[in-house]
Image (tube, grey):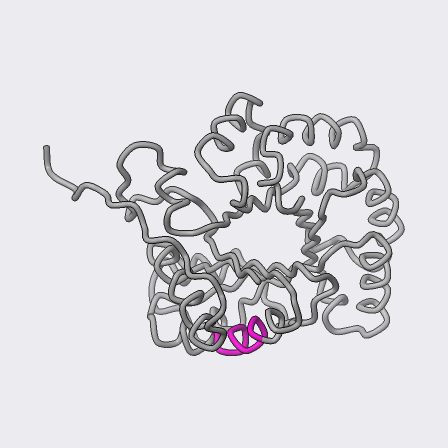
Amino acid sequence: MRLSVGCAMWTHTAWPATGDKLRSYASWCDAVEGNTTFYAVPARRTVETWAGQTDPGFRFVIKLPKTITHERRLSGAEAELNGFLDTMEPLGPRLHALWIQLPGSFGPSDLATLAGFMRMVPAGLRVAVEVRHPAFFTDRWACEQLERVLERAGAEWVPFDTTVLFAARPASPAEYEAQSKKPRLPRRTRALTDTPIVRYHGRDELEPTVAGWRPWVTQTVEWLRAGFSPTVFLHTPDNASSRDLARRFHGEVRALVPELEPLPDPAETEPLTLF
């Protein structure tokens, strides 16, 4: 039985670290979203350092480059996909899932393309797909068709829950920016596999953020009791508190599922000084 938690990044100015930043982050959380690979493919030696700073059980959910998902829209990208996977190979078992985040314009009429792309992914590699076209959330037929494509490939549907973020007008520049960039879609809680992945976005204030994740605490407990192994990522507008919130979420679930293994104690860091 395992629940992994993490954030959208492993470095933040609010998180002091002594030594390797990823190693320090991995003492707080046991999963991370690999967002940087969306913008640029790192050198293989860089990926090797990621592996060297994390235990084999650490979970990377690595996002496919935008050249594949947004520019090529999954078409004619087999060579690029294979090259990317070769670069990620040093992660070994740490590569928990290949994250395919699709643009909001990728809709029901593109499902055949998605199905074809899935057939190019090597067997045994876990795939998690995030869609943002409104029809997948509001049209029952579109939802069922997408689920059928994903289930045939053994892939998961990744929900990005921004309902709390959009529950009130922005109260800060960070909330305003988040609302201008994040998708506004209904909450979805159904898992297609036994390794569901959730992205939850809160607000600046602690109280609405914690109150808003209650449905996910309940859902996560149900998944754990069913033998699932979920991964939950915590976001806030500036993400300064997301590392602590991820641990708090894990703690709330563990209070209801005492047999769940606790997270390790964070590594000590040196206090920030002026010199």
Q: Is residue 85 left or right of residue 173?
A: right
- Residue 192 percent across, percent down from the top left: 74, 64
Q: Residue at x 42, y 43 (%)?
A: 10
- Residue 129 percent across, percent down from the top left: 70, 53
Q: Residue at x 86, y 42 (%)?
A: 119
Between residues 54 and 35, which one lies in front from this camera angle? 54
Quadrant in the rendering for residue 117: top right
Q: Magenta span has 267?
A: no
Q: Quadrant of the C terminus?
A: top left
**In the image, is residue 243 above or below residue 253?**
above
Q: Tally the numbered discs.
A: 0
- Residue 161 percent across, percent down from the top left: 56, 67
**In the image, is residue 146 above or below residue 129?**
below
- Residue 171 percent across, percent down from the top left: 35, 69
Q: Quadrant of the N terminus?
A: bottom right
Q: Magenta span has 219?
A: yes
Which segment did they paint magenta? 213-221
Q: Is residue 97 left or right of residue 214?
A: right
Q: Residue at x 34, y 45 (%)?
A: 12
Quadrant in the rendering for residue 156: bottom right
Q: Residue furthest front?
A: 259
Q: Residue at x 47, y 50 (%)?
A: 30
Secondary structure, magenta segment, majority class: helix
Between residues 35 and 61, which one lies in front from this camera angle? 61
Q: Is residue 136 left or right of residue 173?
A: right
**In the image, is residue 248 above or below residue 233?**
below
